[in-house]
Image (cartoon, grey):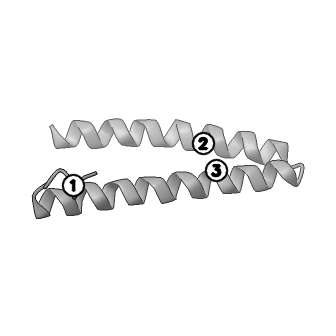
Amino acid sequence: VLAGAAVDGGWLALLGIGFCGAYTTFSTLALELWSAFEDGRRREVVANAALSLALGLPAAYLGIWLAS
């Protein structure tokens, strides 16, 4: 989509790397949660998901705040 929209090289790199990084991070989290769930480690699933949200959302807010 970015290449087809003729996005400038710098923006293409930034957005492409950002998208790929976010996608692989999310897919790794989903895989880890699913593997723990299948193994019956329910507490680990809940703790991992809760900590990811509890630490990730404030980190995202901090990043937005620092960038503005």
Q: Earlier in the sequence, mark 1 or mark 2?
A: 1
Against 60, residue 9 (above or below) is below
Residue underneath mark 1: 4
Give the alpha-carbon distance from disc 3 to disc 2, as whole Å.
14 Å
> Would you call the spot at circle 2 few (<14 residues within 10 Å), some (14-19), or many (20 or more)?
few
Secondary-structure class at tag 2: helix
Residue 30 percent location from the top left of the image = 64, 50
Residue underneath mark 3: 30
Residue 52 percent location from the top left of the image = 56, 44
Residue 19 percent location from the top left of the image = 36, 54
> Would you call the spot at circle 1 few (<14 residues within 10 Å), some (14-19), or many (20 or more)?
few
Give the camera-side residue of 48 and 36: 36
Q: Is residue 14 left or right of residue 36?
A: left
Q: Earlier in the sequence, mark 3 or mark 1?
A: 1
Q: Amino acid at mark 3?
A: Ala
Q: Earlier in the sequence, mark 3 or mark 2?
A: 3
State the residue at coordinates (17%, 50%). Answer: 5
Secondary-structure class at tag 1: loop
Q: Is residue 37 left or right of residue 53?
A: right
Q: Amino acid at mark 2?
A: Leu
Contact, CB < 8 Å: mark 3 with mark 2? Answer: no
Residue underneath mark 2: 51
State the residue at coordinates (10%, 58%). Answer: 8
